[in-house]
Image (cartoon, grey):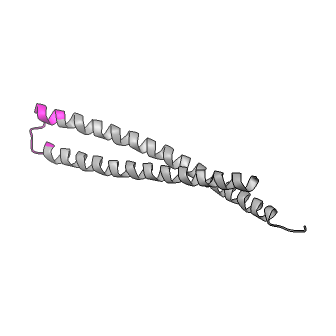
Amino acid sequence: MGLLVSQIRLMYLQQARLDLEYKIQLITQTKMGLSQSVSDLMQVGNDYDPESPTTKMLQQRQAKLKVLEQKLDQQMAAYQTRLKMIDTECESARAMLDKNIQSSFSYGR
């Protein structure tokens, strides 16, 4: 029974790891898009008078995008921490699986 439980736990952890890696990839792609948007806003903002309402509106949007980018950074840090935890637990689950395999298939000791 321990062997089966170990295999199920390891499969669950591997699936959770893949899920977190996918979420990190999505955040990375979103951050790249945000960076491009901020860059575009900066270029467009250079064409206007610094005191114009359009420039101020662009600066506000740029500030909002930077706040969103910071939130994405925080979310990514949380996902990376969870990923490290899962990696550590995977190592433990692999060790338990190896131990269960050895005890299940050892004869006469």
x and y percent of residue 53 in the render? 12, 31
Residue 99 x/y as whole percent: 76, 61
Q: Which residue is drawn at 75% across and 63% down?
A: 101
Q: Which of 101 and 33 is in front in this view?
A: 101
Point 29% across, 46% down: residue: 34
The part of the chain drawn in magenta is 45-57
**Where's residue 8, x and y in %?**
64, 52
Left-right relation of 39 to 72? left
Residue 68 placement: quadrant: top left
Q: What's the residue at 31%, 40% (across, down)?
A: 66
Q: Is residue 8 magenta?
A: no
Q: Residue furthest top?
A: 53
Q: What residue do we see at 23% from left, 46% from top?
A: 37
Residue nearest the observer in this picture, 88 or 73: 88
Question: How many numbered marks appear?
Answer: 0
Residue 51 visible in the picture: no
Please state, as top left, top right, bottom left or bottom right, where the C terminus lies in the image.
bottom right
Vertical placement of residue 70 versus 102, above or below: above
Measured as percent of width and height from the top left, residue 96 is found at 73, 57
Residue that protrudes farthest toward the right in the picture? 109
